[in-house]
């Protein structure tokens, strides 16, 4: 089994003008960024305030504004060696300057927006291959918020309203950036009521662990397995390995799905979950002593 040397930090996001609007959830008229506690954790997982971070704004429809605000946010924490990479097309992704920059960085941060833009623009490029290679073979940090978190897995939700999520066919899935296999990330999880969306995704892919990330909430994943909850909100874990019944293969699109024995865990800051063992731990001491 390939054990990556790098660290993944997936964050549930917060409302901002660069994130795709979902029906029934009115966008706010200001940029709201991650609480400094999460940004500070990202810095500490690299080299502290001397870290060299590249912010990748590909998912956003307002990349310059989002990038500038991340520079300001990191600067307030004393980290001033932050670059912004505005890759807006597949042609941009092949620029040697961008590839050189991510080859030297201590980590990258994928912003929010539209996760399908990330996969459509970056998928199969040398730019992404460098990041994947460094994540697997070096102590390299890959962080992402909202769409940037959802795109981290091999199996990625790219569409699905909260209101119709328990109707077959309402949740659309494709291939993500593939930093991790056998997981599915969802963001803005509590605020937008995405329980049904992730439940359908896991019922359709029961070999995957569903990870529902609340806003100002995230997970730090080491060794591709050890997942720690961080931030002020909740992370929900959906384990479909022991599903005994689901009608999802037998009903028509638009019909309600049923699922038996979908296991759900609720994590708060300081809780751990080991993905390979599918095991919840209350805190670090219990996890270490497992």
Image: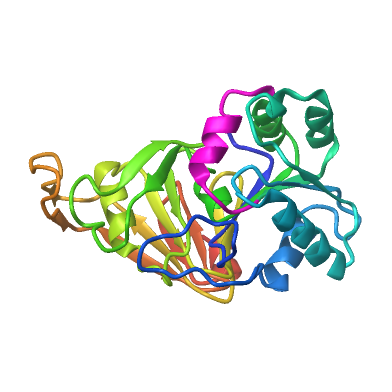
Q: Is residue 157 left or right of residue 197?
A: right
Q: Look at the picture and state if 64 lies above or below 249.
A: below
Residues drawn in magenta? 111-126
Please report the residue visible at 10 percent of the width from the left and 51 percent of the height from the top.
Answer: 255
Q: How many marks?
A: 0
- Determine if the magenta segment contains residue 117: yes
> Which residue does the image show at 85% across and 59% down from the upper left?
48
Horizontal side of 287 relative to 82 (left or right) equals: left
Q: Nearer the viewer, residue 1 or 103?
A: 103
Residue 258 locus on image (x, y percent) = 13, 55
Does residue 179 appear in the picture of this structure? no
Q: Position of residue 185 (x, y in %)?
A: 46, 51
Picture coordinates of residue 174, whole percent (x, y): 39, 36
- Asked whether 123 falls inside the magenta stretch, the response is yes
Q: Residue 59, can we see it?
A: yes
Which residue shows up at 76% across the image and 59% down it?
Answer: 70
On screen, residue 137 versus residue 174, left or right, reads right
Q: How is the image coloured?
A: rainbow
x, y percent for residue 160: 33, 52
Along the viewing direction, whichever of 80 and 50 lies nearer the viewer: 80
Residue at screen point 58% across, 31% down = 121
Relative depth, front residue between 64 and 169: 64
Q: Which corner quadrant of the image does residue 249 belong to?
A: top left
Q: Is residue 264 above or below residue 152?
A: below
């Amino acid at each position: 089994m390939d054990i990556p040397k790098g660290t993944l930090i997936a964050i549930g996001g917060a409302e901002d003008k660069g994130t795709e609007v979902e029906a029934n959830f009115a966008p706010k008229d200001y940029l709201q960024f991650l609480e400094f506690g999460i940004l500070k954790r990202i810095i500490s997982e690299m080299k502290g305030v001397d870290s060299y971070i590249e912010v990748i704004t590909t998912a956003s429809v307002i990349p310059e504004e989002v990038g500038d605000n991340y520079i300001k946010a990191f600067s307030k924490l004393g980290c001033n060696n932050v670059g912004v990479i505005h890759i807006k097309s597949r042609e941009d992704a092949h620029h040697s300057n961008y590839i050189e920059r991510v080859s030297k960085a201590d980590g990258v941060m994928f912003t929010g927006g539209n996760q399908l833009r990330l996969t459509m623009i970056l998928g199969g490029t040398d730019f992404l291959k460098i990041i994947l290679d460094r994540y697997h073979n070096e102590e390299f940090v890959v962080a992402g918020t909202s769409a940037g978190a959802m795109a981290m897995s091999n199996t990625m939700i790219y569409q699905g309203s909260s209101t119709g999520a328990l109707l077959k066919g309402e949740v659309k899935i494709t291939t993500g950036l593939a930093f991790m296999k056998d997981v599915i990330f969802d963001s803005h999880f509590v605020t937008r009521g995405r329980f049904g969306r992730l439940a359908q995704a896991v019922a359709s892919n029961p070999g995957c662990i569903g990870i529902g990330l609340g806003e100002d909430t995230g997970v730090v994943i080491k060794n591709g397995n050890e997942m720690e909850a961080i931030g002020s909100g909740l992370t929900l874990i959906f384990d479909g390995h022991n599903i005994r019944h689901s009608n999802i293969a037998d009903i028509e699109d638009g019909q309600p799905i049923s699922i038996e024995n979908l296991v759900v865990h609720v994590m708060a800051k300081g809780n751990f979950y080991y993905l390979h063992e599918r095991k919840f731990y209350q805190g670090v001491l219990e996890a270490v002593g497992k």
